[in-house]
Image: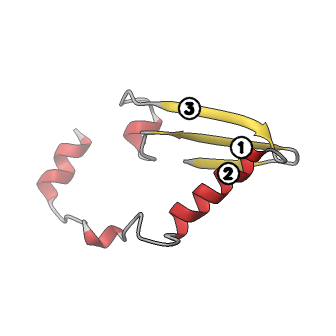
Amino acid sequence: MVTIEKEEKFIAMYGSANLTRRNVDDYNLETKVITKTSKDTILCNSMKIYFDRIWTNKGTYYTVHYENYKVDSFIKTLIYHF
């Protein structure tokens, strides 16, 4: 989920895409949804609360550090890029 706040608008982009070159450049077909709303709506407030909870791991762990699953493999890196 990516959020953008402007003067009066709130934009959220979310779906199953990862923020990697392969996904952002449309190499993978995945769900992509964009929601545009004013900043004073219940929807906007709910999205901000959800994003903050996931981003900061409030209450439990939703994400872990990259190092937990990091793989230093030249072969896997080569396969990923080609």
User: Residue placed at 34% from the left, 67% from the top?
Assistant: 66
Q: Quadrant of residue 65?
A: bottom left
Q: Nearer the viewer, residue 16 or 75?
A: 16
Q: Secondary structure at mark 3?
A: strand
User: Residue placed at 54% from the left, 40% from the top?
Assistant: 14
Q: For the residue marked with disc 1, what is the amino acid?
A: Leu
Q: Position of residue 75 (x, y in %)?
A: 12, 53
Q: Which residue is mark 2?
A: 46
**Disc number placed over residue 33 in the picture, else none:** 3
User: Residue placed at 56% from the left, 64% from the top?
Assistant: 53
Q: Which residue is mark 1?
A: 43
Q: Position of residue 63 (x, y in %)?
A: 40, 64
Q: Position of residue 52 (x, y in %)?
A: 60, 63
Q: Nearer the viewer, residue 3 or 41?
A: 41
| Residue 24 as seen in the image, left or right of residue 11 | left
Q: Secondary structure at mark 2?
A: helix
Q: Quadrant of residue 80?
A: top left
